[in-house]
Image (spheres, helix red, strand yellow):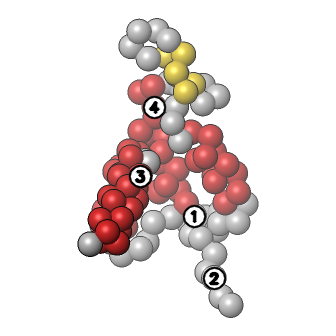
């Protein structure tokens, strides 16, 4: 019984972390393309920038409703990811390279 409780607690914590760290801009991705696994680099960029456009983010920060400078969560991570992939994808289609072993 003790192991069951520990397992359940660990499962709950992991589930909570997954939900808490989700990126809201990914909801703007085309669900149809996502289901077919056809999302391109440009689809990800478009969704990200459309989500953050109303916030007028500058260098990872924006002004909240109270006028305070606020860090845009996930901005820096996306910019790193974007920088890494922008030279590796197909320039015309945005398609990611195929992987092989």
Residue drawn at (41%, 27%), measured in percent from left and top? Answer: 54
> Mark 1 or 4 closer to N-term?
4
Please give the label number shown on residue 17: 3
Classify the position of the C terminus by image quarter: bottom right
Residue that appears at 70% across and 66% down: 88
Q: Can residue 52 be seen in the rendering of this structure?
A: yes
Q: CA distance from mark 3 to mark 4?
A: 27 Å
The spot of residue 23 in percent (x, y) is 43, 47
Mark in the foreground, 3 or 4 = 3
In percent of the image, x 59 and y 70: which residue is there? 96
Estimate how packed mark 4 is, as few (under 14), some (14 to 19) or many (20 or more) residues with alpha carbons within 10 Å.
Answer: few
Q: Are marks 1 and 2 in contact (CB under 8 Å)?
A: no
Q: CA distance from mark 3 to mark 1?
A: 31 Å
Residue at label 1?
94
Give the mark count. 4
Between circles 3 and 1, the one closer to the viewer is 3
Mark 1 or mark 2, which has the lower sequence index? 1
Look at 61% across and 46% down and name the residue there: 77
- SS for tag 2? loop
The disc placed on residue 53 is 4
Residue 43 in the image, given as x and y percentages of width and height: 47, 57
SS type, badge 3: helix
73 and 17: which is toward the camera: 17
First in residue order: circle 3 vs circle 2: 3
Contact (Cβ within 8 Å) of mark 4 with mark 2: no
- Sequence-wise, the earlier of marks 4 and 2 is 4
Q: Describe the element under mark 4 as helix, strand or loop.
A: helix
User: What residue is shown with label 2?
Assistant: 99
């Amino acid at each position: 019984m003790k192991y069951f409780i520990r397992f359940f607690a660990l499962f709950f914590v992991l589930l909570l972390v997954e939900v808490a760290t989700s990126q809201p801009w990914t909801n703007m991705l085309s669900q149809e393309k996502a289901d077919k696994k056809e999302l391109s680099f440009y689809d990800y960029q478009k969704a990200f920038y459309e989500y953050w456009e109303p916030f007028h983010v500058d260098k990872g920060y924006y002004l909240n409703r109270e006028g305070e400078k606020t860090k845009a969560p996930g901005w820096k991570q996306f910019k790193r990811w974007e920088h890494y992939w922008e030279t590796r994808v197909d320039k015309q289609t945005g398609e990611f390279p195929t992987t092989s072993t």
